Each structure stands twice: as structure tokens, then as C-alpha cells.
Image: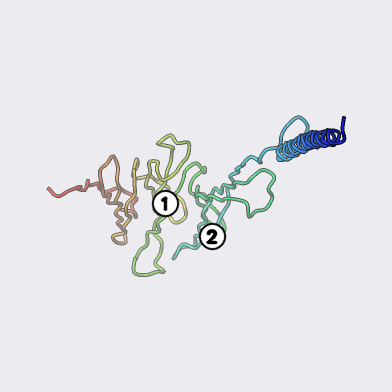
Amino acid sequence: MNRAKIFQFIQASNTVTVFVASLMAIALFGGGAAILAADSLFSRQTYSGDSMAIEPEEESETKLELEGFRPLSGTPYLIADQVARQYKSRRGVLSSSSYDKQVSTRNYLFFDGNGKTSHWLRPDSDFLFLEKRELTQSQKDANSTVQRLLYSLVKADSNDDQQLNYDDAKAIALSDPSGKNYQELIQNIDQVQQIHQQNAQRVLVFYRADEKHYVADIDFVQGKLLATQELPLAPN
């Protein structure tokens, strides 16, 4: 074999060697990259023993609380709302700023400033009170004596959605400013539209029920429903 052929053979051998080495390097680097990628992927999940840690579940807790007392004008009585305050948080989160609060009035506590005694409006906290209206001797005098209290409330889950809210049937009730003599006058109201005190003895309640509109005339001093009148929905 002459020198030229020997030189060509050596060159070809070197080329093959470099090519094979390059393939091995690529395979080795690619495999390492795959291992690194897999390791990066699975490192995003945290394991503890035989279970995988997940996002903490949301918890809720309802507490009954009393809000501040307010005087009822012209009487020795003060009134405080008893509210059901619902706290929602993620399990394990202790900061109070993480709480989502929902508040609803469930009862009223009356305090007699003279006798230093207290009295609940209701013997339980099963109802949802939507509105409380103070009915006074004079509408013109801001300090006029409170004669009676009128309430709009929900007594039961009438639409079966597992909660008491504005969508349930409502009732209208009265009590003395002491919280005693509680009585319900109107039932099964879909929507209370307006409460208007007409004078020192009468109050009008406008409401909707069964797709009809009504006005109830109430003598709140005597605690009597005097009349209920259906209102026209359109001119004749």
C-alpha cells in the first residue's frame, strides 16, 4: 500500500471515530436532559409518607355574637342585634385577614335601663330578621317616643335551597319597645316593597305575594291588622 492510500485510510478512520463520538455525546447529553426534565417535573409535587400534599381545604364556622346596644328614643330600653357571623378560611391559616365574613341578624336582645334586666325578642335564634322599623308617636320629631317595633323576617326555608335568605317567604311582626308582646300579623310575603308610617297609630305595609300586590293597614298601637287590599297591576 502506497503512502497516499495509507493517508486516506487514516483520514477516513478519524472521521468515523469523530462521528461515533459525537453520536455518543448527543445520546448522553439528551439522556441527562431527559432525566433533569423528569426530575424538575416531579419535584413540583410534595409527598408525605404514602400521600401527596394538596391545597388546604376551605372551612367555615358560624358564631352568634351581640352587636352594640342602641337606645330606643323616649324609653328606658336599649336594643342589640344578635348576629350569626360566618367565618370562612383555609385550613391552617391563622391570620384573621384571611377570613370572609357573612353576617345575618337572628334575634334581638332588649335591656331595661331602669330595672337592669334583659329580654330576648324570640326564645330561639332560628329566624332571619331582614328589617326592623321603629314606629314612633311623631314622625317629625327625631326624639319622639318609640311606640312599637315592626319586623320583616324569614321563618323557614320556603324554596328548599338549604338556607334562609331574601328569596324565602317573609312575615311581618310587631313587638313592644321592651321586646315583649311579639306577634306576627302577615305571612307568606314574596317581597316587602314599602313600609310607611301614616300617623301615630297606623302603618301601611306594601308587599307582593303570589304575583299580586297588596297594601296592609295596621293599627300598631293595638297590634291589629285592620284590612288588606289588593292593588291593581294595570288601569282598567
Looking at the image, which residue sits at the far left? Answer: 236
- Three-letter amino acid code at disc 1? Ser
* Depth order, front residue of 10/21: 10
Q: Residue at x 82, y 35 (%)?
A: 8
Mark nearer the viewer, 1 or 2: 2
Q: Quadrant of the N terminus?
A: top right
Q: Residue at x 29, y 46 (%)?
A: 208
Identify residue for label 2.
69
Badge 2 marks a residue whose secondary structure is: loop
Q: Residues within 10 Å of mark 1 (few under 14, many from 20)?
A: many
Colouring convention used in this rendered image of the protein: rainbow
The location of residue 166, given as percent across then percent down, is 41, 45
Q: Which quadrant would residue 185 be assigned to in this image?
A: top left
Q: Residues within 10 Å of mark 2 (few under 14, many from 20)?
A: some
Q: Which quadrant would residue 211 be assigned to in this image?
A: top left
The location of residue 127, given as percent across then percent down, is 47, 43
* Depth order, front residue of 132/183: 132
Identify residue for label 1.
175
The location of residue 125, given as percent across then percent down, is 52, 44
The correct choice, above or below, for 109 with respect to 11 in the image is: below
* Depth order, front residue of 34/41: 34
Name which of mark 1 and mark 2 comes first in the sequence.
2
Left or right: 6 in relation to 187 = right
- Three-letter amino acid code at disc 2? Phe
Q: Residue at x 73, y 40 (%)?
A: 40
Left or right: 227 in relation to 220 = left
The location of residue 91, given as percent across then percent down, is 67, 43
Left or right: 78 in relation to 169 = right
Badge 1 marks a residue whose secondary structure is: strand
The correct choice, above or below, for 176 with respect to 56 in the image is: below
* Cα–Cα gap, marks 1 and 2: 18 Å
